Amino acid sequence: MDLAMLYPSYKSFDRFIDVARLKSLDQYLTEKLQEHARLATHDLFLNEHRLDKDAPHEPGAREVWLTRTRPGTPYNYLDLNRCSLWEPTESAAEFSELMDFIKTLPFEQTGRMLIIYDNKASEVPAHRDHLETDVCHEFIWFRTNLRKPFYVYNAQTQEKLYVESYSAWFDTVNQFHGSDAVSGLSFSIRVDGIFSPEFRKNIPIPPHNPASTPALWASLDQNF
């Protein structure tokens, strides 16, 4: 971990996106995800790089994939931003209003798009997404309401920081993240891709450990 970085940390993107439009999708997404939960049309969230190795690999949260890798392309987590490998699923048409919103986000291209939801009070234990410090995925994590108790976590100091914004970008390698159990339906969306050249002008570049880029940005402005 780079001691020059502030951990735990996240960079709020609320000033870069249309939060009012995002919040207006809340009832729309709630109804559609409640229907998914009733029909059990879902994949399970897999918790690979867990802080606690005894924590469940399948903690209970579920997923709706809005894009998938093209037929014949093996899934590799490090390929989330190789945009040419990804194409819309049938769920993308079902969630058309969400897809329209995603088009307004500051991406030049998009790759993986995923909804993670839960209605059974499932905890997602602290984990990292991958272990490659030389890989920085450009993504936006966002939600239409603040019900999901999502946090970033510094395993060295045992400090937990809850995300208070509607959107965020955070270091998924040098710190852990997870979510607490909460009653009722909670959900978030993550879109990976390549940020637009104009948007990239805002982003500071660390001299090493590219995965720490979001933490550097958060550290410089202290504005989570």
Image (cartoon, grey):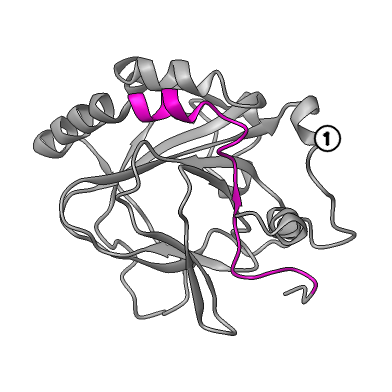
Question: Which quadrant holds the C terminus?
Answer: bottom right
Residue 68 lies in the magenta-colored region: no
State the residue at coordinates (69%, 59%): 222
Q: Position of residue 173 (x, y in %)?
A: 62, 63
Residue 54 x %, y %: 35, 80
Q: Which residue sits at x=31%, y=44%? A: 187
> In which quadrant of the rendered image does the N terminus lie?
bottom right
Tell me the magenta residue range: 4-24
Q: What residue is rendered at 37% in x and 16% in y?
A: 97
Q: What residue do we see at 63% from left, 28% from top?
A: 83
The quadrant in which residue 7 appears is bottom right
**Residue nearer the viewer, 194 or 75:** 194
Q: In the figure, is residue 72 to the left or right of 174?
A: left
- The count of marks equals 1
5 w.r.t. 28: above or below: below
For label 1, the SS is loop
Q: Is residue 65 visible?
A: yes
| Quadrant hosting residue 86 | top right
In the rendered view, tell whether residue 216 sits above or below residue 24: below
Q: For mark 1, what is the residue?
A: 201
Position of residue 220 in the picture relative to residue 8 (left or right): right
Task: Give, as a three-letter code, the residue at label 1.
Answer: Lys
Q: Nearer the viewer, residue 207 or 87?
A: 207
Magenta stretch containing residue 21, yes or no? yes
